[in-house]
Amino acid sequence: LTLIVGVLESVVGLVSVWFVIRQLKSETETEEKENVVNVAEFIFKYNQEFIDSPKLSQIESYLESTLVTNTIPAIHSLTQTSEIRQQLVNYLVYLEGFASCIQEKVMEIKSVDNLFAYRFFLATNHPEVQELELIPYSSYYKGVFGLYREWIQYRIFRSSCWKNAHNL
């Protein structure tokens, strides 16, 4: 009888441990899902802030127009006015904040690549932006430079994976 009670206590103990582990796992999964939702909301809001800012959108349009028309010096004449230059600086500061979010693991590059890559590389690869702001004031844009290196590596890796997948 003592043996049966001991076995039953052990079984009840194991079942209890299983329920506790299951509950902890369920709570962890719920927290992970909530975290994914929170990150998605943050990304959406961050993107929406950019879209809703006429000044950031205006700089993006200027950058695009110089690429489309191959008139790179156009931005140089635009930045002669302090208001337009400030808009460009704000655009780059926006990217610096974005870089901080990636570096602090608030977002991952793979989660934002399709949504933000165009805006990021439009500015960072633009010769006039480099000449007028990024290079002379590089100490203010360390996050942008770091993210640039990381993002380029990610895109090279992703590109090579994509090519290898199609070659199979």
Image (spheres, rainbow, N blue to C red):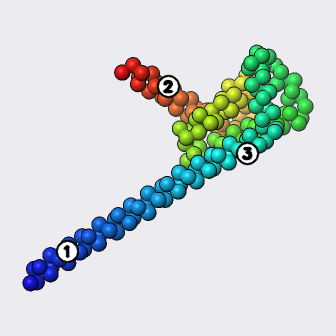
Quadrant containing the C terminus is top left
Query: Can residue 139 be seen from the camera position used here?
Result: no
Q: For this view, does 64 lie left or right of residue 81?
A: left
Q: Residues within 10 Å of mark 2 (few under 14, many from 20)?
A: few
Q: Quadrant of residue 27?
A: bottom left
- Which residue was labeled with disc 2? 159
Q: Nearer the viewer, residue 19 or 113?
A: 19
Q: Residue at x 83, y 21 (%)?
A: 74
> x, y (%) of residue 120?
67, 33
Quadrant containing the N terminus is bottom left
What number of labels is visible?
3
> x, y (%) of residue 83?
88, 36
Q: Say whether marks 3 and 2 touch (CB < 8 Å).
A: no
Q: Residue at x 62, y 32 (%)?
A: 117
> x, y (%) of residue 127?
73, 22
Q: Residues within 10 Å of mark 3 (few under 14, many from 20)?
A: few
> Circle 2 sits in a helix, a strand or a loop, which is it?
helix
Q: Amino acid at mark 3?
A: Glu
> x, y (%) of residue 6?
15, 79
In space, the residues marked 1 and 2 are separated at their CA atoms by: 55 Å
In space, the residues marked 1 and 3 are separated at their CA atoms by: 58 Å
> Circle 1 sits in a helix, a strand or a loop, which is it?
helix
| Earlier-in-chain disc, 3 versus 2 | 3
Query: Can residue 1 be seen from the camera position used here?
Result: yes
| Earlier-in-chain disc, 1 versus 2 | 1
Q: Which mark is residue 10?
A: 1
> Please, which residue is most extreme toward the bottom here?
1
In space, the residues marked 3 and 2 are separated at their CA atoms by: 30 Å
Q: Residue at x 23, y 75 (%)?
A: 12
> Circle 3 sits in a helix, a strand or a loop, which is it?
helix
- Which residue was labeled with disc 3? 49
Q: Say whether marks 1 and 3 touch (CB < 8 Å).
A: no
